[in-house]
Amino acid sequence: MFSRKKQPPIKSLVAQGTKIEGNVHFAEGMRIDGDVVGDIRAAADQPSILVISETARVEGAMHADHVIINGQVLGPVHAGELLELQPKAQITGNVHYKALEMHQGAVIAGQLIPTAVLVEEKPPLKLASNSQ
């Protein structure tokens, strides 16, 4: 699972009072304190973290490995590894996740959709007492 100790560094910031209209693409880590109207997508070729703070508002889809939300999101959320919903999180949209951590007070108006975990096919077990 996604290790909290080996998170990528947050290199991008949308500060409080800033509004971005359009899609946002980032690498490694990003923190949103302002407003974004558009989709937010992490680069797929490396681990990523996206933090939506208490003061943030996002209208659009978001895609990252580790997503932490404590603000308002209007749109679907796709967390490839871990989704953390902090107490002031408000999501209107479907939530796709592999692992979910939800604090008391967080609100989701949409479906919770766990991503399918592929199970490796293992050969059938043969008991030693049945061998001939």
Image (cartoon, grey):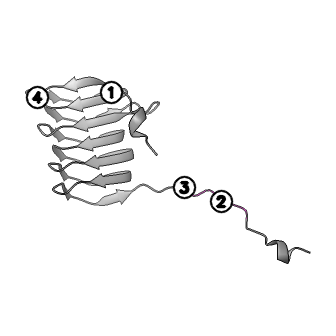
Specify the segment rendered in magenta: 118-123
Q: In the image, residue 46 lies at what x, y percent?
A: 45, 30
Q: In the image, residue 103 lies at what x, y percent?
A: 23, 54
Judge whether residue 23 can be spotted in this image.
Answer: no
| Three-letter code for the amino acid on which mark 4 is drawn | Gln
Q: Which mark is residue 26?
A: 1
| Three-letter code for the amino acid on which mark 3 is drawn | Leu
Q: Residue furthest left?
A: 17
In terms of depth relative to the viewer, which is nearer, 97 or 54? 54
Q: Are marks 1 and 3 in contact (CB under 8 Å)?
A: no
| Three-letter code for the amino acid on which mark 2 is drawn | Glu
Residue pointed to by mark 3: 118
- Asked whether, in this view, residue 98 is left or right of residue 26, the answer is right
Q: In the image, residue 116 lies at what x, y percent?
A: 47, 57
Q: Which mark is residue 121?
A: 2
User: Which tag, 3 or 4, sits closer to the chain's start?
Assistant: 4
| Three-letter code for the amino acid on which mark 1 is drawn | Phe
Q: Are marks 2 and 3 in contact (CB under 8 Å)?
A: no
Q: Which mark is residue 98?
A: none
